[in-house]
Amino acid sequence: MAKRFKAAVIGATGYGGAELMRHLLVHPEVELARAVSIDFVGEPIASVHPNLEGRTDLRFESLPAGEAARGMDVVFLGLPHGVSAAKVPEVIAAGARIVDLSGDFRVRDPATYARYYGAAHPHPDMLTRELFVYGLPELHRERIRGAKYVASPGCFATTIELALLPLAEARVLAGAVEVVGITGSSGSGVTPSVGTHHPLRASNLRTYKPLEHQHVPEIEQLLSDVAARSVTVRFVPVSAPLVRGIFATCFARVDASLEPAAIAALYRDRYAGERFVRVPARRLPEVVAVKGTNVAEVGVVTGDVQEGKRLVTCFAATDNLIKGGAGQAIQSMNLMLGLDEHLTLDDLGGWP
């Protein structure tokens, strides 16, 4: 039976591309119609992604973005920042919906984009809230349903935002938030580097881009929008000897009048109806519980009152390639196409 919608993945040889295609190949309503890349052109999908052996006859194609988008209902852009922005006008002209997994349309201020991404944005006039909806479904579900173009959040950003969202929505955050985020090597992409080379990663912990990681501005932008005040985030990312997974620890201060039971209730109530965010009842979040799933785990511990503010520590864990990447992008696609938001995303993962 023919499927109702067609999708193309541009940037299909990366880890994000692999996850996008894994979900699309089992999607009951959306057909993976094109896999576009500048590498491995003409080769079968399984030559790069062996887990997809026997599931498709597609081969990697090298096509201009506009041609790749022609006839498609949705195009996923799994491209590096800068490259993605350059392709977007062609895809828009072809009439396709877009889910962009790069950082090119997450931040609204062109100067902030240039500071964190190292170059001027090629289309600064497109950095508007109205054009690209920020694709965090747990916050922007209804806007995503009506969107043609979605900027899917970064992996660190997704994890940290979900950890802090209940406090921001309650407008009780006071002062800056300090965050330490630990990440696996797949977040650095498929191209080998010093940071992902196994002998240097396997038994090592090291920081990189402290206080200047490119996900900081999108986190600050979202939290400030929700909290209705400027929120500063001081973020230190850490490379860990994991392949998949992010674990974020966020140190926040809230109004002293907010009691521990009320803080716990904020989290429990905020995520009670969310299938892809859970607040464990008897433990704190951990990576192995969410690896291989589109689920984020979130937890909170309250501390003492110091200098008129209560100390709160928030925790969150995600699979960076799924809830922090391709899975969340599929979640947005489902909403954009008017489908069940959870299609192909209910894998429970494994333990341990």
Image: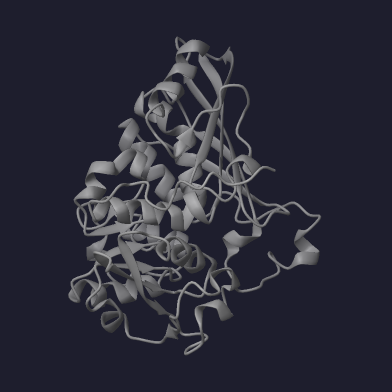
Please report the residue visible at 53 percent of the width from the left and 16 percent of the height from the top.
310
As drawn, is 200 to the left or to the right of 137?
Answer: right
Q: Is residue 30 above or below residue 179?
A: below
Q: Is residue 36 above or below residue 183?
A: below
Looking at the picture, tell me which residue is in the foreground, 10 or 132.
10
**Color scheme of the displayed model:** one colour
- Snapshot quadrant of residue 307: top right
Please report the residue visible at 45 percent of the width from the left and 75 percent of the height from the top.
56
Q: Is residue 274 above or below residue 147?
A: above
Please report the residue visible at 46 percent of the width from the left and 33 percent of the height from the top.
164
Where does the N terminus fall, quadrant-wise? bottom left
Q: Residue furthest bottom?
A: 42
| Residue 334 seen by the camera | yes
Q: Is residue 166 above or below residue 222?
A: above
Q: Position of residue 239 (x, y in %)?
A: 67, 54
Q: Position of residue 82 (x, y in %)?
A: 40, 72
- Snapshot quadrant of residue 28: bottom left
Looking at the picture, tell me which residue is in the foreground, 249 or 228.
249
Q: Position of residue 141 (x, y in %)?
A: 28, 42
| Residue 108 seen by the camera | no
Q: Position of residue 330 (x, y in %)?
A: 38, 56
As drawn, is 167 to the left or to the right of 183?
Answer: left
Looking at the picture, tell me which residue is in the foreground, 106 or 91.
91
Where does the C terminus fall, quadrant-wise? top right
Circle count: 0
